[in-house]
Amino acid sequence: MTPPKKKRKKPSKEPDDYWKIKKELKEKGIKLYNQIFFRDWCKACGICIAFCPKNVFNRDKEGKPVIEKPDDCIGCHFCELHCPDFAITIQERYPDRRRKKNGK
Amino acid sequence: MPNNATRLPHDYLRHDKKFPHVWCPGCGNGIVLGSLIRAIDNIGLEKDEIVMASGIGCSGRLPVYVDFNTLHTTHGRALTFATGIKLAKPSLKVIAVMGDGDATAIGGNHFIHAARRNLDLTAIIINNQIFGMTGGQYSPTTPYGCKASTALYGNIEHAFSIAELAVTAGASYVARSSVFHAKLLDKIIAQGIQRRGFSVIVAMSNCHVQYGRRNQMGSPVIMMEWLRDHAVRIEKAGDLPAKDLQDKFTIGVLADVDKPDYIEEYQKIRERAKEG
């Protein structure tokens, strides 16, 4: 008989102050977004830099975007929809998720 | 597959096909591909239900990158191959992707007769106003006076509009958008796939390398701004005077007629023949 596999405890990705920050942001009425940029697929066309309404990106030496002001992003998803190389993803930083049962 | 990008198109791409794709930096074909994937995901179709056929040209590379049943055919004949597939197995959703030269110059005859026949196909025509891959020759949609590699002193022929041609030829759903208006493009592609009958989706795109460079628009950003400034919503176009609409194009749904398609009519004939 094979011994039962030990369940490895997954490290929690959720930071301890997740719900605290989320509550504070909700009271202020702000939503924050993460910009995930996949550099290897980017061809430096400059569409995301030129059309960003809040100038979140800045141009680096190769012409590829550098995320300069991540907190200014309003989540319009323009860069995500118009990136021809699928190199940018915009995600909400503190999305609504189910609260852990045993957590505080 | 990039592990730090979790977005939707990666579920549909063939990651063994050498990414980033072959198109020039900032090419509109990538945006159309993204729109197509989002539209198909919104409808909720399975990957196996869809067949994509393409002709020759930059747009011919588009089905290579997506994980559907795909077919890369000869120049201008994407619609004829698509017709064959649809007649052999009507349950499949067949999408033909063509460029403007592919659909209206080399395959112009096939295009108007596919529209007249009203077979249940979706034709996505990426209109970049030039033959991009073959070296910048002028196409039937190159505007009057614009320069191309075969029109060094300016094009002396007049362009025609693909969408209006399709309306006249009898397509049941015709819509136009541009790559700048990607959300509208998502919507009309989804509607076009769901409608019965022949649906034509014209996506105005940018070719800054072959078309733009010769016409003082040598970057994707300038061409996207051109698309933004020259597009007029069809709902608003009626109120504007004709002078304002001279060098502009309308975006939105141009025709939406519900009429029985070829497969239904053919089925009726088969049943009638069985009785007699």
Image (cartoon, rainbow, N blue to C red):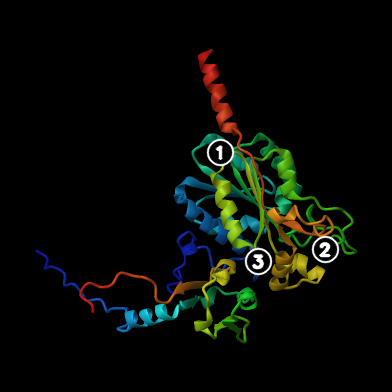
**Quarter the C terminus of chain B occupies:** top right
Q: Residue at horizontal 59%, vertical 37%?
A: B84
Do badges 3 and 1 share one subunit?
yes
> Numbered disc 1: what chain?
B
Residue B11: percent from the left, percent from the top?
45, 61
Q: Amino acid type of disc 1?
A: Lys
Q: Are marks 3 and 1 in contact (CB under 8 Å)?
A: no
User: Cβ–Cβ below 8 Å for labels 2 and 1?
Assistant: no
Q: Nearer the viewer, residue B94 or A23?
A: A23
How many other residues sit within 10 Å of disc 3, few (<14), some (14-19) or many (≥20)? many
The answer to which of marks 3 and 2 sits earlier in the sequence is: 3
Give the CA distance from mark 3 to mark 2: 19 Å
Q: Which residue is mark 2?
A: B149
Disc ID at residue B86: 1
Residue position marked by numbered label 3 in the rendering: B27
Q: Secondary structure at mark 2?
A: loop
Mark 3 or mark 1: name the one nearer the start of the chain.
3
The chain identifier of the residue carrying mark 2 reads B
Residue B139 is left or right of residue B10, and the answer is right
Residue A10: assigned label = none
Taking the view exactly as shown, the residue that stands out farthest to the left is A1
**Is the residue marked by circle 1 packed among few (<14), some (14-19), or many (20+) residues within 10 Å?**
many
Residue B14 to residue B97: above or below: below
Mark 3 to mark 1 CA distance (whole Å): 30 Å
**Badge 3: chain ID:** B
User: What is the x, y in percent for residue B22?
Assistant: 61, 66
Which residue corresponds to the image point at 44% horizontal and 81% vertical from the top-left? Answer: A28
Q: Earlier in the sequence, mark 2 or mark 1?
A: 1
Q: Amino acid at mark 2?
A: Ser
| Mark 3: amino acid | Cys
